[in-house]
Amino acid sequence: MRPDTYYFNPTCEPAIANGSPFYTAPARLRKFESDLGYLPAWLGNEWDQVLVTGTVDNSYNQEMRKLGFRLPELINLKDAMANPSWLKQPKGTLRPWGWSPAIHQLFKPAINSYQDDFRQSSVATWQEAHKNLYSRLTALDLLTRMIGKYSVNWLPEPTELPVVCFTLDQIYIERSRRERVVVKTPWSSSGRGLLLFPNPDQKTKNDEVLSGMLNQQGFVTIEPWLEKVVDLSYQFLSKSIEIKYMGRTFFETDSKGRYVRNLLTDTPILPDEVSSFLERHNAEVVQLLQAALMESGYTSLYEGWIGVDALIYKDDMGKLRFQPMVEINGRFTMGAIALKLREHLASGSHGFLQIFYSKSGNFQDFRQKQQVNKPLIMKDKKIVSGFLQLTPPLQEHHFGAYLEVISSRGAVCDKL
């Protein structure tokens, strides 16, 4: 069996915006990528390989194997790229977290070692058309067409859709139309690259941030800050000019719209009105999204996982509505990881997937405390409850990924 190659590069969107094949992320984001480099292992098989920029901790794989998890081999990126044997080793498919010109440049020395199906695919080389595919404008275009085609009263009104702005004057004109708005850069994700209004900073500070956004990426989008009820994501797989639905996940964000964690359940506890609204429209939302993606460049220009973030919100009249396409992520997402992790949970158990960060502390100390307070309990190789680290808990890691599982669903989802 030829191994697939996984690599964690969540900075793919700013790399796309930058455009250089030699793009280097800021130091803090490089640390984030390095510490969490083994996270894609939960997407792969035991014969696959995960390349990391940090320390290779083989003891972690051994520990996971004792628990019944068959995870891919862990290999240092620099060692692999300097090893002629690895460069020539027959491989299956290259699977970075996301594509960019920089990723293609990074793996250029090894590209001929991958199977023909991959090297002939639409993602084997970077095309200029790919950049627009990853822009927020793609989601805006598809959503606009969806609303125009399906005149239903539970989708957003046209006035609630994002507006594209190229100057500060345009931004402030649109800002004056709403009490609360959010400005977003076209190539960003996970709640990054955005600015909320009203903003506690002074107007001069706002101008500085907004000017930086415009200078870096050319334009921004501005949209109403909706009264959110619940965040969710629909996962799809694009392959062979088909879009396959893989499942839905629920996640939480903070007050600034930044990602916090994924819930490991398909049916969280929600208020009756919200739960009824969700289930009444869920199948239709899946069909609408699937049809929109089929009509987009994601069938001809992309192969791989697609995460479509959505939300249920209340409009100005207090009525529930569905925003089915907040953004499209043509890459792996935490939602894809959450779907895979749900397969390891015992029946009746639920929990969450979360990222740890401490500027002064480390993931190793956090793991040790959690193991004492929330010991892992497994039955028939399934997780019943407790804490499980998803990335090696090394002393130098300020970031880490973990899941926490309990057998009572309500306690996990009470924040929704």
Image (cartoon, rainbow, N blue to C red):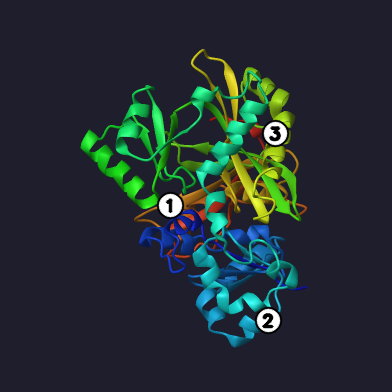
Task: Locate residue 228 relative to residue 174 in the image: left or right.
Answer: right
Residue at 73% x, 43% y: name it. Answer: 245
The answer to whether the residues at label 1 and label 2 have Cβ atoms under 8 Å apart is no
Classify 68 as above or below 382. Answer: below
Q: Earlier in the sequence, mark 1 or mark 3?
A: 3
- Residue 328 appears in the figure: yes
Which of the two marks, 3 or 2, is nearer to us in this view? 3
Quarter the C terminus occupies: top right
Q: Amino acid at mark 3?
A: Leu
Classify 278 as above or below 141. Answer: above
Q: Earlier in the sequence, mark 1 or mark 2?
A: 2
The answer to whether the residues at label 3 and label 2 have Cβ atoms under 8 Å apart is no
Give the alpha-carbon distance from disc 3 to disc 2, as whole Å: 42 Å
Q: Which residue in the structure is indicated by mark 1? A: 357
Which of the two marks, 1 or 2, is nearer to us in this view? 2
Residue at 47% x, 51% y: name it. Answer: 356
Classify 98 as above or below 186. Answer: below
Q: Earlier in the sequence, mark 3 or mark 2?
A: 2
Q: Which residue in the structure is indicated by mark 2? A: 89
Q: For label 3, count other residues whose C-alpha is less than 10 Å away and answer few (under 14), some (14-19) or many (20+).
A: some
Q: Which residue is at the far bottom?
A: 84
Residue 362 on image: x %, y %: 42, 58
